[in-house]
Amino acid sequence: MSLSDPIGDMIARIKNAQLRNHKIIKLPSSKFKTKIAEVLKREGFIIDYKVEAKESNAIDLLINLKYNSGTPVISTIERVSKPGRRIFSSAQSLPMINNGLGIAIISTPKGVMTDIDARKQKLGGEIICKVF
């Protein structure tokens, strides 16, 4: 199955799983999705992620969602840059998400990182999503 926006699909699956209080979600894997999951884990929004290979040459990404007293840790996750409208930003004009309480995930020439790391390294790039 071909998706026009696989990152948007990943974000939608995370939102829907948290609405139903699922502990683990399974989605098709890619290197870019794995990097986004790595940033979410490092920032404490998910417990863990795992890349799992199946017999049919397909690779799945399993994300273990994090809850605090029954409520999801990720209260808001939304796509910023879409296939039809890419949003790029310089290091100086990267957005602050909820006055620094949330993060923006940025795709820079040195890899996928948070807006805080991109500001420290003075790197701009494509704003993938906002997480709070």
Image (cartoon, rainbow, N blue to C red):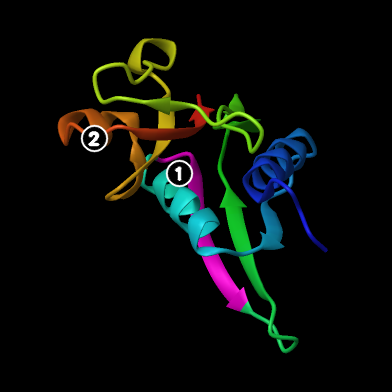
Question: Is residue 95 a member of the stretch shown in magenta?
Answer: no
Residue 61 rendering spot, x and y as whole percentages: 61, 64
Magenta segment's dominant SS is: strand
Give me the residue at 65% from left, 33% from top. 70
Residue under label 2, please give it. Answer: 123
Contact, mark 1 vs mark 2 (Cβ under 8 Å): no
Quadrant (top left, top right, bottom left, bottom right) of the N terminus: bottom right
Is residue 14 shown left or right of residue 48? Answer: right
Vertical relation: 80 (above or below) 6: above
Helix or strand or loop: what does disc 1 sit on?
helix
- Name the amino acid, label 1: Leu
Cα distance between the residues tagged 1 and 2: 19 Å
- Residue 6 horizontal side relative to residue 36, left or right: right
Whether residue 49 is in magenta: the answer is yes
Q: Nearer the viewer, residue 59 or 124?
A: 124
* Residue of label 1: 40
Helix, strand or loop at disc 2?
loop
| Residue at (30, 25) in percent of width and height | 90
Figure check: 43 above or below 23: above
Q: Residue furthest top?
A: 99
Say which of 64 and 76 sits in front: 76
The answer to whether residue 8 is above or below residue 80 is below
